[in-house]
Amino acid sequence: MIYVISGPSGCGKSTLIKNLMACLPGLLFSVSHTTRPRRPDEVEGQDYYFITREKFEEMKDGGAFLEWAEVHGHLYGTSREEVDKKSRQGDLILDIDVQGAHQVKKKLDGARFVFVVPPSYPELEKRLKQRKTDRPEAVALRLKNARREILESSIFDYLVINGELNQALEELKAIVLAHRCLFQQRQKEFREILKSFKSWP
Ligand code: ADP
Ligand code: 5GP
C-alpha cells in the first residue's frame, strides 16, 4: 500500500514518519528530489536527493516525476523510479505537500491519504520557530502557506491531529495496521493456517 502523508510544514510529519518507521517493520520511505538546500542534520539519499534546479527541470521534462510541485520557493518531486522500486518491497510512505497529493490521487489507484495537522495555528508557529531550520522569512512563508494548505484537505482519507506525539503516532500506526489486517491482505498467511487445520489428525 502507498500512504501519502501531507500537512502544513512544521506540523510534525517527518517526526511522525521517523518514529513510525522505527516501530513498525515493512515500511519504506519515498526519498524525494529537491532543490532546497540541505539542512545540517539531513543526509543525502536518505532525507532527500538534493539536486540543482537545472537537473530538476531536466528530470521533469523527461517525465521522471510521478508528481512535483513548487513548495515554499523550492522544487520538490517524487520520482517514478523511487515509487516503482520501493512499492514492490513493502508499504511505501510519501511525505509530500497538498498539491503533490492531489496529483498522486489522480494517478495512483488505491493509495491512502493521510492529512496531519497541528492542534492549533499558534502551536504550528511555535514548532516552526523551535525547529530553527528556517530563517524568519522562510518561517513566515511556511505559516502563510499553512493557512491555504489546511483548506485543501478534502481528498484525504484520514486526519491525524499531532498534539501529543505518542497519541498521533498510535493513530498513524493504527491506519497502517488496520490495512495490513484486511482479510484480502492476509490470504497467504491464512492459507498456511488453513493447511495446518487440514493436516491435523
Ligand atoms: P514537518 O516534517 O511536518 O515539517 P517536523 O517533523 O520537522 O515537521 O516537526 C517540526 C518541529 O516540531 C520539530 O522541531 C519537531 O521536533 C516538533 N514536533 C513534532 N511533533 C511534535 C509534537 N507532537 N509535539 C511537540 N513538538 C513536535
Ligand atoms: P521541507 O522543506 O520542510 O522538507 O518540506 C517542505 C514541504 O515539501 C513539505 O510539505 C513536504 O511534505 C513537501 N515535499 C517533500 N517532498 C515532496 C515531493 O516530492 N513532492 C511534493 N509535492 N512535496 C514534497
Image (cartoon, rainbow, N blue to C red):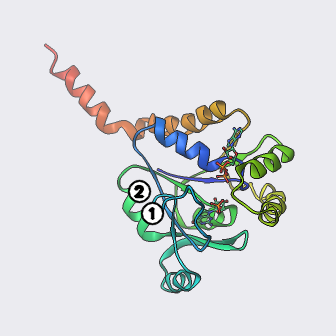
Identify whether 166 is placed above or below 9. above
Q: Residue lying farthest front?
A: 40
Label 2: element kind: helix
Task: Specify whether tag 1 is near ligand 2 (CB below 8 Å).
Answer: no
Percent across and percent down for residue 59 are 50, 81
> Going from the N terminus, do you reach mark 2 or mark 1 first?
1
Quarter-of-image position of residue 52? bottom right
Residue 38 image position (x, y, % from top left): 58, 66
Q: Which secondary structure lies at badge 1?
A: loop
Q: Look at mark 1 in the image and give the residue it sits on.
A: 45
Residue at position x 52%, y 76% in the image: 51
x%, y% of residue 9?
A: 71, 56
Q: Amino acid at mark 2?
A: Ser
Q: CA distance from mark 2 to mark 1?
A: 17 Å
Residue type indicated by callout 1: Gly
Q: Residues within 10 Å of mark 2 (few under 14, many from 20)?
A: some
Look at mark 2 in the image and give the residue it sits on: 87
Q: Dot 1: within a 10 Å radius of its alpha carbon, few (fewer than 14), some, or many (20 or more) residues?
A: few
At horizontal 74% and vertical 36% (from top left) the residue drawn is: 163
Q: Residue at x 45, y 63 (%)?
A: 45
Res 200 quadrant in image = top left
Q: Decide: marks 2, 1 in contact (CB < 8 A)?
A: no
| Foreground of the two, 105 or 51 | 51
In the visual, does 44 lie left or right of 171?
Answer: left
Left or right: residue 131 compared with residue 200: right
User: How many numbered marks appear?
Assistant: 2
Q: Quadrant of the C terminus?
A: top left
Q: Quadrant of ligand 1?
A: top right
Question: On residue 94, which mark appears?
Answer: none
> Which residue corresponds to the image point at 39% horizontal and 58% vertical from the top-left?
86
| In this picture, residue 81 sits left or right of residue 108 | left
